[in-house]
Image (cartoon, coloured by chain):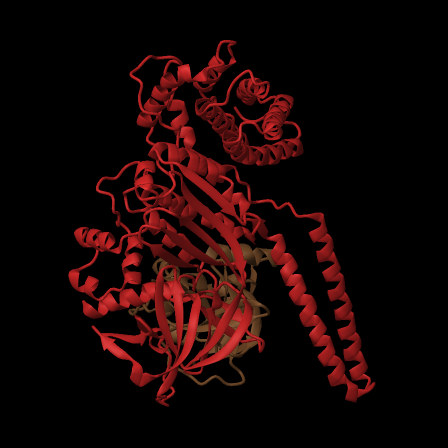
Chain colours: A red, B brown
Amino acid sequence: MAIDCEDQELLEGFLAETTELLEKLDDDLVTLEKSPEDAELMNRIFRSIHTVKGASSFLGFDLLVKVTHKTEDVLNRLRKAELILSSEIMDVILEAVDLVKTLVSDIKGGDIVERELESTIAKLIPFLSESATEATVLAPVFASLQEEKSKAAPTLPGEKPQEALPQVSPPPIRLKEPAPEKAPLPRAPAAKGEELADNSTVRVDVKRLDDLMNQVGELVLERNRMIQLHSDYQFGVDPAGFSDDFGKLSKRMNFVTSELQTQVLKMRMLPVEKVFKKFPRIVRNLARDLGKEVDLQIIGEETELDRSVVDEIGDPLIHLIRNALDHGLEMPDERLAAGKTRCGTVVLSAAHEGNQIVISIKDNGRGIDPDRVSRKALEKGLITEEQLAVMGNREILDLLFLPGFSTKEQATDLSGRGVGMDVVRTNIRKLNGIIEIKNEIGRGSEFILKLPLTLAIIQSLLVEVEREVYSIPLASVIETMRVNQEEFHVVGGQEVLKLRDSVLPLLRLQRVFACAETGADRRTCYVVIVGVAEKRVGLVVTRLLGQQEVAIKSLGKFLANLPGIGGSTIMGDGRVALIVDPMGLIGGGEAAGVRKTA
Amino acid sequence: MQTALKLKGEEYGGELIQLVSFNLEQEEYGINVLMVREIIRMLNITRVPNTPAYVEGVINLRGKVIPIISLRRKFDLAEAEYDKRTRIMVMEVVGEMMGFIVDEVSEVIRISEKEIQPPPPVVSSGIEQECMAGVINQADRLLVLLDLERMFSADERRMFSNVA
């Protein structure tokens, strides 16, 4: 059944508004569970559902009306304190909200599909009868239903919730052995949140738009000034003062354009809250699945970052949080035995740090045991004894990111397939980010992600390699140093540099890029240490030229995917400089190494 | 391509088509004028590592970075010094803007489509033969009509986008 809506604009408005409400709703519901007395919050939730219901009935989306109506009824009873909020009720409400999301995304997709609503509605109905003040009586039944659901449809991270939902149509009440509690569809919210999040249109604060207009006005003035200056110069009016005036002009131009740049950049920014707000619910469900007690603290959710970055960090964060809960935090009893509080803490924080955004996931659990990690890696055949022998603690922790690595004996539906950290690494690499791990055995661990603010204009380090200029994204540069070539060592055919307590593999850009040698064999050269996700490599270059802000230009389809080249940029003199892609380079370097030994 | 040329020719009235003629190693070549975006003088080319030899590098064309291809190298001709007559012909080939270095661009000529003869059968099948769309025999000159879309085989195009 195609959507028959006369007013497309009305429909779009409805979708935008509903999507926003629903996103907020998840978060609010989880908060409500923690503080059920909060009348203001309760009312807000009630209003959201009511708004969705009202709008959908106006537009004639009957399915939506049906579900929201029942949900509203249950919420209404909660509001009037006729029902006492329990996690069972919350499960059902959350399930109903999920169903609403599915329906909304159907509408967004342009096709209304008949969905199975009855099973969810049937779960809501018992809470509406007068006698249902004590909801716990019903709990085992629901638990068994949900248990069955998770058996019937083992939800994989990528699986669409729509596929899972219609399968779940057991008769509303079927008595079964009470099964251990299972939260419904633990992974569904993530997938749904992404489906609903609509990043194709932008809402911009009017004030920002005004500011932007202001800046553009300034720019026009400066342009007029420039034209004036040029014509004055041509007619020979005060040629002596020209240089002075021109200097002032270029200073102002510089100021205005950089202001403009920040303004436009800001428009592309979204608060990281957009990603963070789905976590309370994920954590709640996970904690219940695992039987752990978790307190999730979110800090700095107002931190803003580029929308392209926002889209990419959701998945890695989910994996890291899941890991923190599953591997990091201990069971409540273990925690007590270790002299800690029963309830574990996971802190998710975001902050700006110069031109980067730093996101950290910190838990106060058991920490990562390097011995266990290296043992597992050996068992799985991911590394050899010889490789292990030369590894420092840092390198051992890096093993976590290898595809196929897992400390779990058995893959569960939560973890153990060894995919999660690989996803983290891949996504962070894509964003030119860096991962750092802080670890203290018995005290907890912290994963720190450092990401560039935007992907369109970057700070870069200009370097010279045998008379050719290359630009290295500053976000991945960790440090630079001037080195005498005699300090290089060769280990297993690989040039390395001893740097403090670690051994740094070196990559000569001149060889990688096959630059013609200029003959002069310089004894000293510069090493630019770059980090890609968890890896560090030193790039050997001839000279450092300085730091510059550059706009990234694509090389086009024909030259896309060159190993080690991420794009190009145009320099002040109009020449093109290539941008080094440290990620491709490190991957390429490995491949080259393999070829050499083969 | 013959039909494509005809269609484009018809837009320009009857069966006349316009060609840009250029020189490469004393040979004269022609390219449909509708393919050519602009013709510019040589400028600084930035070398791009790890590309096929005929990719000379990239240039900045008013804020857009486009790849430059040496037709001499592509056609396996001897290298030649760039001089003041060397030109870059910027064309749109398979949806991508690209520049081609040629020895000299001479003129725009109008020819009737009847004058295009099928390329002669040859023993060798070099890349030059692949792009040959026809031969134009006009009194004292011989023009090779090129179809640069054919220059990149499907494989080559795939290789371009998957160099890894």
Q: Nearer the viewer, residue B134 or A340?
A: A340
Q: In the image, A290: left or right of A272?
A: left
- Residue in the image at 32% along x and 22% along y: A148
The image quadrant where one finds the C terminus of chain A is bottom left
Percent x, y of residue A261:
63, 62
Percent x, y of residue A95:
46, 26
- Residue A569 in the image: above or below residue A368: below
- Residue in the image at 62% along x and 31% along y: A14
Q: Nearer the viewer, residue A40 or B145?
A: A40
Q: In the image, A520: left or right of B12?
A: left
The answer to whether residue A315 of the structure is visible from this angle is yes
- Residue in the image at 58% along x and 52% along y: A269
Q: In the image, A521: left or right of A238?
A: left
- Residue A370 in the image: above or below residue A498: above
- Residue in the image at 78% along x and 73% along y: A225
The answer to whether residue B110 of the structure is visible from this angle is no
Q: Quadrant of residue A549?
A: bottom right
Percent x, y of residue B54:
39, 73
Percent x, y of residue A18:
59, 32
Q: In the image, A411: left or right of A570?
A: left
